[in-house]
Image (cartoon, grey):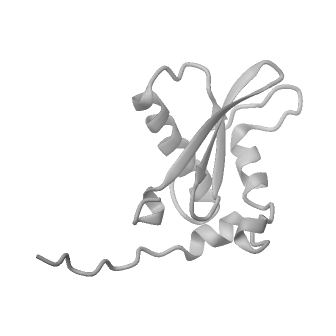
Amino acid sequence: MHENPFADWSATLFLADRTQYVLVTNTTSLYSVVMFGRGITGDSELIKRAVSHLGESMQDDGYHFLRERAFLSESEISPYDASFKLNEIPMSYQSYEVPRDAFGRMRIEPQPPASE
């Protein structure tokens, strides 16, 4: 894990109804977003899209930017809306706390000076 909890994220690709999606999750708080995976061909594109989608979710959760919505197969739920549902689910890792609340309480801990 990265010493800065805001800099430690994981991503995984999954399929739903023959459509590729990417789940991006903060490792500390489990705050998550879901985005379309189509067209992501490398790390640069993955990071660009993840930052954009995280900004969307964070804005509406009271944290950062806002953008467009796109619909997810027949369930008519967008990756944007799926992200909100994920962040309302209590997780045992978080002592049954919802990830959105855990993300809001994260802080960067000061690092002791390096000894010479």
Above or below, 83 against 5 in this view is above
Residue 64 spot, x, y in % from top left: 51, 58
Q: Is residue 7 visible?
A: yes
* Residue under the image location 85 percent in, 33 percent down: 76
Question: Total marks drawn?
Answer: 0
Q: Nearer the viewer, residue 95 or 102?
A: 95
Q: Is residue 74 left or right of residue 22?
A: right
The single residue placed furthest to the left in the displayed view is 116
The single residue placed furthest to the right in the displayed view is 75
Q: Is residue 66 visible?
A: no
Residue 98 spot, x, y in % from top left: 74, 68
Q: Nearer the viewer, residue 66 or 82?
A: 82
Residue 83 spot, x, y in % from top left: 71, 49
* Location of residue 72 (image quadrant): top right
* Residue under the image location 78 percent in, 62 percent down: 88
The single residue placed furthest to the front in the displayed view is 116
Residue 86 spot, x, y in % from top left: 76, 53
* Residue under the image location 80 percent in, 60 percent down: 89
Q: Quadrant of the C terminus?
A: bottom left
Above or below, 60 against 106 in this view is above
Above or below, 40 against 94 in this view is above
* Residue under the image location 49 percent in, 32 percent down: 46
